[in-house]
Amino acid sequence: MNTLSVTIREKVAIIALNRGKSNAMNAELVKELKSLIKNIEQDDQILGAILTGKEGFFTAGLDLIELYAYDENQIKSFWVDFLDLVKTLTLFKKPLVAAISGHSPAGGCVMALCCDYRVMAEGKYIIGLNEVPVGIIVPDSIFHLYAFWLGQAKAYQSLLEGKLFSVDEAKQIGLLDATSDISSLMSHAQKKIQSYLQYDATTWQQSKLNLRKELIAKVSADQTSTLDIMLKQWWAPSTRSILKTIIENLKGGSEK
């Protein structure tokens, strides 16, 4: 794999995003992660998984520089795969913990929301869904995922404002379950997942799926019409202009 590194410790897969400085998500990362999660689901020797990144970044979210250059077929394929990744992570029956090692906006926040438990490194980091200010329409499934943890009203307000939360704010509203010094982040995540694994696997897994029944139905629903609207807006001049400005700022920052 080119964008992920995996280690197995005490029958738990530790999946570290490993793509450049900020782990920005492109088509390759999404495909690799989706395939890996499906394989772990079927592997009886792996009992659960921890998702993490590198110090400073869980993931900066979507790689807007690369995605901006995709043609119509490529961007449609990307979004289909991304929504399928969200579905795959949400339906993953084994324990899944997010050890959020730094900034986690947009796509990073989405992946963390799919997990059963989220612990984030302390520091001046941000997490949340800021798609609306970027010009990206949020799919129904992702709103329902946000609302599953934050509640309908808070998710509604936060999405429409493109709100990004500090670590402390995110914990206060229930977006995070815990915070940790970066030096103990992984040990915290490992301790939590082992607490899940002490229970009978069938009981725990079926209970998870039962509790997520409505959410699973939402992320599994046909999103063709939503995707069509998203893609139409992706190519709208207003969105292209916003994206171009963001990309120019990103490139300017990387050159300093």
Image (cartoon, helix red, strand yellow):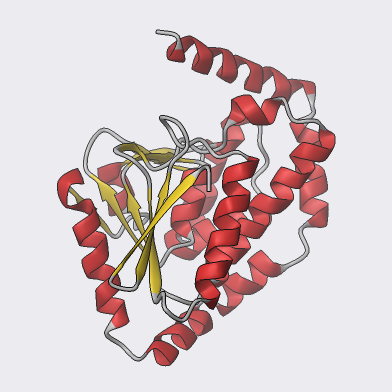
Residue 152, visible in the rendered structure: no
Residue 126 located left or right of residue 109: left
Looking at the image, which residue is at 19% across and 51% down? Answer: 180
Name the residue nearer the viewer: 123 or 19. Answer: 19
Name the residue nearer the viewer: 246 or 184. Answer: 184
Name the residue nearer the viewer: 217 or 82. Answer: 82
Residue 20 position (above or below residue 165):
above
Looking at the image, which residue is at 76% across and 58% down? Answer: 223
Residue 21 located left or right of residue 221: left
Looking at the image, which residue is at 21% across and 68% down? Answer: 191
Q: How many marks?
A: 0
Residue 223, visible in the rendered structure: yes
x, y percentage for residue 28? 62, 43
x, y percentage for residue 155? 50, 53
Residue 177 located left or right of residue 184: right
Looking at the image, which residue is at 51% across and 43% down? Answer: 3
x, y percentage for residue 50? 37, 61
Residue 121 located left or right of residue 130: left
x, y percentage for residue 227? 77, 49
Quarter containing the C terminus = top left
Residue 187 position (above or below residue 228):
below
